[in-house]
Image: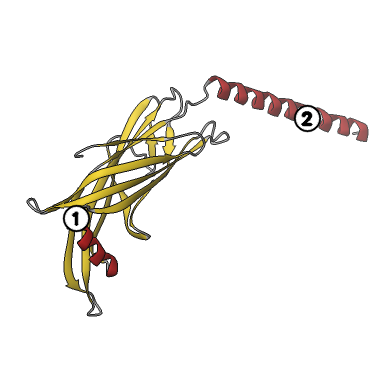
Amino acid sequence: MPLRSLNSGWWIVLQIMWRFLFSSGVALLVFYIATQPTRPDISIRIGKFNQFLLEEGVDSHGVSTVFLTCNYSTKVIVDNKSYVFRLHIHPPSIKLFFGPLNFAKAQLYKLIHMISSTGELYASSHESTTFRLKIGIKNQAMYGAGRQMEDMLQSRAGFPLILRMNLISDFRVVWSIINPRYHQNVECLLFRSYNKKHKQATVVKEKCRGILTNQRFFSLEAYESI
């Protein structure tokens, strides 16, 4: 076969491949524009402490200190407005702070809608999905912070806790070739007081702010029970 004919054949193949890739790219772009996912609405409901107990004790080294046992839960509601694509939700992060001390982290413990077989969380297309987060610790030595908590808890002013949450979600369009991602962050200042009659701590006041990221906000609301 002449070299010129061989080169001509390869040139034709390259032209066909280029046109195919270009046409596929245009088709994907048109498909994405036509079905572009609407930004999801994500809200967090500030719950209550089902348990908050401070007790005197001795740690494993024989040091006298205050131990904290607490159980707190909150809801996250995801409203996926896309009619075509489901929303993938990354494992959320939620933490409780007393001053600079991060004394508790969240665990995803109940899903009210759907988890895939891979253990990942999705919000189905054009649906509202609700799941709960549980923050809990048991008999954690608090040392100096525990004494301060105890004093402030029994005062009329109560004491402040900070709740911080970070949640990442994304749409995986056409095998993740197009992957719009959303970051939501929220920080809440919770004021707690001690009810001597019922021997329990309650949230008496909360103040939250959404942190703007990619033009997406958390919406926030308080509620009494889960």
Can you tell which quarter of the image residue 80 is in? top left
Q: At 22% across and 72% down in the image, what residue appears?
A: 65
The residue at 21%/62% (across/down) is: 151
Give the total number of marks visible in the rendering.
2
Residue situated furthest bottom in the rendering: 62
Q: Residue type at mark 2: give it.
A: Val
Q: Residue furthest left?
A: 197
The residue located at (52%, 31%) in the rendering is 173
The answer to which image quadrant residue 120 occupies is top left
Residue 149 in the image: x percent, y percent?
Answer: 24, 61
Q: Quadrant of the N terminus?
A: top right
Task: Give percent across and percent down for residue 9.
Answer: 83, 30
Describe the element under mark 1 as helix, strand or loop.
strand
Question: Measuring 92% from the left and 35% from the top, which residue is drawn there?
Answer: 3
Q: Nearer the viewer, mark 2 or mark 1?
A: 1
Instruction: Give percent across and percent down for residue 23.
Output: 68, 23
Residue 221 lies, in percent from the top left, at 30, 35
Mark carried by residue 13:
2
Q: Is residue 131 left or right of residue 52?
A: right
222 w.r.t. 20: above or below: below
From the image, tell me which residue sits under label 1.
Answer: 52
**What separation in Å lies between label 2 and label 1 (alpha carbons)?**
71 Å
Asked whether 36 or 188 is in front, the reply is 188
Left or right: residue 79 compared with residue 146: right
Secondary structure, mark 2, is helix
Q: Amino acid at mark 1?
A: Phe
- In the rendered view, would you say 58 is above or below 138? below
Taking depth in this image into account, of 175 and 57 the one nearest to the observer is: 57
Residue 162's tag is none
Its colouring scheme is: secondary structure
Q: Which of the two labelled residues, at mark 2 and mark 1, occupies the earlier sequence position?
A: 2
